[in-house]
Image (cartoon, rainbow, N blue to C red):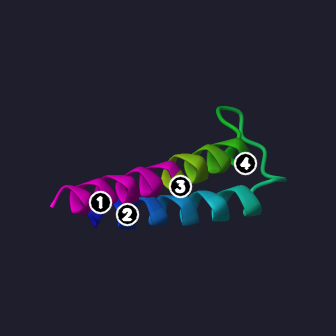
Amino acid sequence: MKGIGLGVVLAIAGLALWLTTEEVESSVISLHKAGLILAIVGAAEALFALLGLGKKKAKK
């Protein structure tokens, strides 16, 4: 359950960052692209945690 919550929080934070920082200029990293990557990683984390939870229940 911890992985699912963490993934959802990361996905929401990444999505918010991606949607709100399109015009922001940074010399080191593009916040717009970082938000998109964070949203993808968070969604993948939640998905893999759900799949792992499903496999645990199927074995019982």
Viewer-nearest residue: 50 or 13: 50
Q: Closer to the N terminus: mark 3 or mark 4? A: 4
Q: Is residue 60 left or right of residue 30?
A: left
Check disc 2 and report its element: helix, strand or loop: helix
| Residue 55 counted in the magenta span | yes
3D distance between C-alphas at marks 3 and 1? 15 Å
Classed neighbour count for the residue bearing mark 1: other residues with Cα under 10 Å, few (<14), some (14–19), many (≥20): some
Location of mark 2 (residue):
4
Classed neighbour count for the residue bearing mark 2: other residues with Cα under 10 Å, few (<14), some (14–19), many (≥20): some
Q: Closer to the N terminus: mark 1 or mark 4? A: 4
Location of mark 3 (residue):
43
Task: Report the magenta residues as a range.
Answer: 44-60
3D distance between C-alphas at marks 3 and 2? 9 Å
Check disc 4 and report its element: helix, strand or loop: helix
Image point 65% across, 65% down: which residue?
16
- For residue 2, the mark is none
